[in-house]
Image (cartoon, helix red, strand yellow):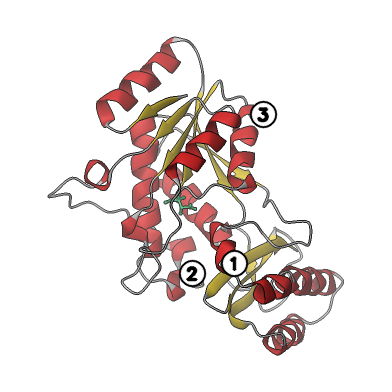
Amino acid sequence: MQICRDLPSLRAATAAFRAAGRRLAVVPTMGALHEGHLALIGAARAAGAGAVAASIFVNPLQFGPNEDLARYPRDEEGDLAKLRAAGCDLAWLPPVEVMYPPGNATVIEVAGPSAGWEGDARPGHFRGVATVCCKLFLQSQAELAAFGEKDWQQLQVVTRMAADLDIPIRILPVPTVREADGLAMSSRNRFLSPQERATAPLLHRAMTEAAAAIGAGAPVAATLEGALARLRGAGFAPDYLALVEAETMRPLAARREQGPMRLIAAARLGTVRLLDNIAV
Ligand code: PAF
């Protein structure tokens, strides 16, 4: 596995993949890798990538001033070992000054699916995500980019951005990888205390039951209120639990007869903010 930390070496490596006729996929990550990230590499290969480049970059632009940038888990050595074992071809580890050189003045602002939910809870977050993903796409010139469905709104924002900017890349959504008890894998789960870890799967359970009820015709508002009360009773502090149009992220007060819907949630458990979503 090649390791690149500057743009000339990244460009030389990706040009060599192209010259060899290997379709390149990029897997953007912030490190602290788990099975969910490694599944992105496998999915990219299964979708026809002949070479996979994973980026590890804790993107300061997507963290608010009071967020967990400083405590975001970092384990470069462990991550590189996992990428090697997963058959990754290239690790892209740009220092902050390579990604954002002094004097940089351009950001990508995506309206539409950035509005609401995480967009409200984390002002500026999607500007940071869209900017870094746009840069990663252009830097790698990959044909394919794999993103986990766990961050559903992020997936919609990045898909919209790539389409709107005519970036010739296919965004590949990859199903959420879960622990055996249903908890969606996340680099931040390590901060749950043992007691919180035991409570955490209730989020997915409550969502699964609410989605089934809504799918069967139960009223949306009452079903969501019931699920929220159950979560609060178990110690969660929910930010939102909502039914939305899957692509636009617009809220739905009632079940749609046509078009995909998603149940999305964010809830704090202790110091950890858990995100999850499922199809309805
Ligand atoms: O989902 C993440 O880990 C990040 O938001 C991403 C896509 C790597 C951009 O920094």
What amino acid is found at the position of numbered circle 3 in the picture?
Ala
What amino acid is found at the position of numbered circle 2 in the picture?
Glu
Task: Check contact, mark 3 vs mark 2: CB within 8 A.
Answer: no
Q: Secondary structure at mark 1?
A: strand
Task: Please name the residue shown 54% across and 72% down the image.
Answer: 272
Task: Check contact, mark 1 vs mark 3: CB within 8 A.
Answer: no
Q: Which mark is residue 118?
A: 2
Q: Residues within 10 Å of mark 2 (few under 14, many from 20)?
A: many
Q: Secondary structure at mark 2?
A: helix
> 48 left or right of 221?
left
Q: Which mark is residue 275?
A: 1
Q: Which mark is residue 93?
A: none
Residue 252 position, x and y percent, is 65, 74
Residue 236 position, x and y percent, is 64, 82
Task: Please name the residue shown 64% across and 77% down the image.
Answer: 241
Residue 109 visible in the shown view: no
**For residue 157, above or below residue 78:** below
Task: Please name the residue shown 64% across and 40% down the image.
Answer: 39
Q: Secondary structure at mark 3?
A: helix
Task: Check contact, mark 2 vs mark 1: CB within 8 A.
Answer: yes
**For residue 34, above or below residue 169:** below
> 2 left or right of 45?
left
Q: Residue furthest right?
A: 216
Front residue (pair 253, 272):
272
> 253 left or right of 88?
right
Q: Residues within 10 Å of mark 3 (few under 14, many from 20)?
A: few
What amino acid is found at the position of numbered circle 1 in the picture?
Leu
Q: Which mark is residue 46?
A: 3
Q: Earlier in the sequence, mark 2 or mark 1?
A: 2
Q: How far separated are the C-alphas under marks 3 and 2?
A: 30 Å
Q: How far separated are the C-alphas under marks 1 and 3?
A: 27 Å
